[in-house]
Amino acid sequence: MTQDQDLDVKELLETHAARGRGRHVRLLLLVGALVGVILLAALHWRGRSDGAVRYETREVLRGSLSVTVSATGNLEPTTEVEVGSELSGTVRSVEADYNDRVRKGQVLARLDTSKLEAELRESQAALQAVQAQLADAQATLKETESELARKKRLWAMTDGQAVSRQDLDAAEADLARARAAVSRYQAEVAQKQATIATIESDLAKAVIRSPIDGIVLDRSVEPGQTVAATLEAPVLFTLAQDLTQMELIVDVDEADVGLVREGQRAEFTVDAYPDRRFPASIAQVRFGANEEDGVVTYETVLIVNNSDLSLRPGMTATAEILVKEVQDALLVPNQALRFTPETTAGHEDESSGSLISRLIPRPPRPTSKKKPAVPSDGREAAVWVLEDGRLRRIPVTPGETDGTRTVIQEGELEPGMLVVVDAVRVGG
């Protein structure tokens, strides 16, 4: 082997050695980075799993609790009357406006009656003509009665010599025709009188009057407007009898309707006065059900005193109906009845497992935080208290609830005790 060949082999070996050292360095760097990530993750999860738990508590109180049912609805007048017109015609004048106070019998509007007045005069003239004909028929009747009576006397006196039987029969026929004429004209007189009475009634209806004492809520007619009364009377005015007493009709959910009774007290609010609560009382719980989008509700009527007239028909109100009130009761927050402490049962021992599992601890498994509803019979309900830093379970029997607090009927609780409502993991 020549000197040049020795140099080439040496350079080749040095090149391979340099490449090997480079791969080794990159591998070491990669392993170091991986170990660093593993250590950081282990510290992170270890810190989370080893954090302390802080318990939030609330005080057990003694006081009163009110159970209410919420419902929404609208205010309405106790008596609302729609005033319409039975006649068709043109409105001649309107004599009442919005918010006007009206008395029973007061004129609200008048229709044009020129056509009715002409028909009345025509019917009155026809009546007079028929009455004249009736008088003539009655005179004829009287004359025929006298003629028949005279012929009957002559027949009797002369034994049929002065008056023939034929003349007597003719006189009796004349009397029958005279009586029939009188009856006919009497019927015509009655017919004409009925026609006049109908026209006079229409003339009276052409004057629209208030049927009640009240206030005008709505007016839907203007002077000169044509009113067409066909199948039903058009509504011209809407009146409310007395706005100092109103009704609030709310929809009570089917789940709550069994608690609502007549005579119960309630309070409600309206958007117009958000800071004011209005008193009311239950007057009626209707049996008829209303269903909308699968939700069944029952109309409930509340009586409202509106002596200051601050409330108006149609306002939307949210009512709170007092269905039960408990005095001098032991009360705990509802969160205390729903609280369940965390458990570690079922977790794997972190000391076991592979090297990787020890280097990278798994994050804590989610603990069961079931928040059961308060049992209706109270047999499984309990609250937790802290004693020397440890939790102790106290079985209780819950009673009524207002959605925030619950009455405790039985249990080793006293006013002033602190019950746990939540647990928060901190530190680590």
Image (cartoon, rainbow, N blue to C red):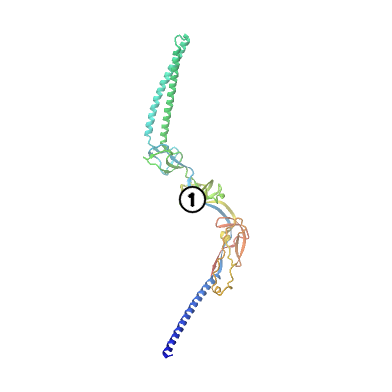
User: As drawn, is 184 to the left or to the right of 326?
Assistant: left
Kind of residue indicated by mark 1: Ala
Which x, y percent locates residue 405?
56, 57
Q: Work out whether residue 155 can be spotted.
A: yes
Q: Residue furthest front?
A: 1
Q: Is residue 296 above or below residue 136?
A: below
* Closer-to-camera residue (40/398): 40
Which x, y percent locates residue 104?
45, 38
Q: Secondary structure at mark 1?
A: strand
Question: Mark 1 packing: few (<14 Cα in 10 Å), some, or many (20+)?
Answer: many
Instruction: Name the residue located 41 percent from the left edge and 21 percent from the top edge.
Output: 135
Q: Is residue 284 above or below residue 145?
A: below
Q: Is residue 10 above or below residue 341?
A: below
Q: Work out whether residue 150 can be spotted.
A: no
Q: Is residue 291 above or below residue 39?
A: above
* Closer-to-camera residue (157/241): 157
> Which residue carries the number 1 mark?
317
Q: Quadrant of the N terminus?
A: bottom left
* Closer-to-camera residue (94/256): 256
Which x, y percent locates residue 264?
55, 48
Q: Quadrant of the C terminus?
A: bottom right
Instruction: Name the residue located 44 percent from the left edge and 87 percent from the top edge.
Output: 9
